[in-house]
């Protein structure tokens, strides 16, 4: 059952409470700690992207097209559609011989409110590259181009690229394919549901791939290294994922998923953890992530200080006055 993770105060009064679940596992799948339900069954949403990106490497597409670390990182991203993100997507499309019209994820504005307003004020004509999921989509398209799969139907569950990704997810999460529920994500590709502890397992293995078979070990190392080398690709300017990875100095990778999912893989400690907010509220995830990292003694004092604005977060009004705080209300 979900437990209290977040309190939002206004003055001295706790005005809002958010409940959720947290589970920490090692790379063998053993539960180390949990708060709430470690078996919470939910969709992985975009927190699955780094694991889905494995197949870009496993398929040989990454080597064929000589993808850079930045290009691999954006395939794991929910990016903000900033200029450097668009340039990276354009580079991938050029390498694989396709144009933006091949991306079937839809056209949406930036996840960053400030940048979305800037795009609107400058009357920028949006296209599918601006979608926060376009990196994932071009990664899948690169596999199609490399292996000769049709590109016009890559988002369908029965397409070979989606079936290969399902195999990777089942392997990394130690879940039978038949036990993974498939839905349709916001960007129109299959999305995968499973127990929260299995999501944490995949991230433990992503960060600590020693016991994986050689192809998976290589894929893990390349993806972890790419995300750490280019945290700006994972979300963007002032994005929590980018700032968390940058501040942790190669110790971890973290990735948000829609409806209040967050996953972290911690290098050298042989652990990963997964969070699900019962409310689906993504704005309150950061203090939960920082509380878990603090309790696990992952970050040193300088690294925690670099992320202090997230733990706790300020609750501000329309005039940007601080009226309270958004704080973690648990320990593991």
Image (tube, rainbow, N blue to C red):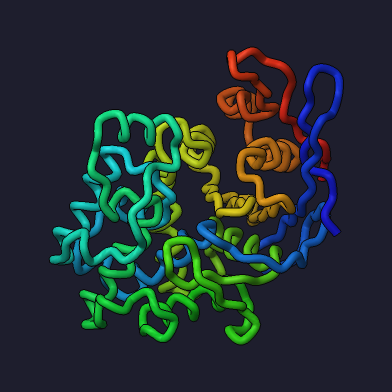
Q: In the rendered view, would you say 200 is above or below 182?
A: above
Which x, y percent locates residue 314? 66, 22
In the image, residue 276 sits, relative to residue 7, either above or below, namely: below
Give the residue drawn at x 82%, y 55%: 2
Q: Look at the image and tell me whether residue 158 can be seen.
A: yes
Residue 322, image x, y percentages: 67, 15
Q: Residue at 21% of width from left, 63% of height from top?
A: 101
Give the image location of residue 9, x and y in percent. Answer: 79, 26
With 4 as the anchor, is 313 left or right in this view?
left
Instruction: Choose between 50 and 223: the one closer to the eye.
Output: 50
**Residue drawn 84% across the image and 28% down it:** 14
Q: Left or right: 247 with respect to 90?
A: right
The N terminus sits in image quarter: bottom right
Q: Name which residue lies at 81% across and 60% down.
A: 37
Residue 229 showing in the rendered view: no
Indicate the position of residue 252 as horizontal and vertical percent values. Answer: 54, 46
Q: Quadrant of the C terminus?
A: top right
Q: Is residue 305 above or below residue 258?
A: above
The number of numbered discs placed on residues in the rendered structure image is 0
204 vs 177: above or below: above
């Amino acid at each position: 059952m979900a437990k209290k993770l977040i309190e939002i105060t206004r003055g001295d009064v706790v005005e809002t409470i958010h409940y959720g679940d947290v589970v920490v596992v090692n790379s063998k799948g053993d539960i180390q700690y949990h708060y709430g339900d470690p078996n919470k069954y939910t969709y992985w949403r975009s927190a699955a992207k780094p694991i889905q990106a494995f197949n870009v490497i496993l398929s040989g597409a990454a080597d064929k097209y000589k993808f850079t670390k930045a290009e691999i990182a954006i395939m794991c991203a929910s990016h903000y559609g900033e200029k450097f993100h668009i340039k990276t997507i354009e580079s991938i499309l050029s390498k694989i011989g396709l144009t933006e019209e091949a991306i079937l994820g839809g056209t949406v504005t930036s996840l960053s409110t400030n940048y979305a307003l800037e795009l609107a004020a400058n009357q920028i004509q949006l296209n599918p590259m601006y979608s926060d999921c376009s990196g994932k989509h071009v990664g899948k398209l690169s596999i199609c181009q490399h292996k000769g799969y049709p590109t016009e139907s890559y988002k369908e569950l029965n397409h070979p690229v989606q079936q290969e990704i399902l195999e990777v997810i089942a392997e990394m999460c130690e879940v039978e394919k038949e036990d993974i529920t498939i839905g349709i994500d916001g960007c129109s590709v299959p999305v995968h549901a499973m127990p929260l502890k299995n999501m944490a397992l995949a991230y433990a293995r992503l960060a600590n791939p020693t016991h994986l078979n050689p192809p998976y070990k290589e894929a893990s190392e390349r993806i972890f290294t790419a995300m750490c080398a280019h945290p700006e690709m994972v979300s963007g300017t002032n994005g929590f994922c980018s700032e968390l990875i940058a501040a942790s100095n190669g110790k971890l990778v973290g990735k948000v998923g829609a409806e209040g999912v967050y996953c972290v893989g911690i290098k050298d400690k042989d652990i990963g953890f997964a969070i699900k907010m019962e409310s689906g509220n993504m704005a309150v995830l950061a203090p939960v992530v920082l509380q878990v990292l603090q309790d696990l003694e992952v970050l040193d004092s300088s690294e925690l200080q670099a992320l202090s604005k997230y733990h706790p977060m300020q609750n501000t009004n329309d005039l940007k006055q601080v009226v309270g705080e958004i704080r973690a209300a648990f320990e593991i």
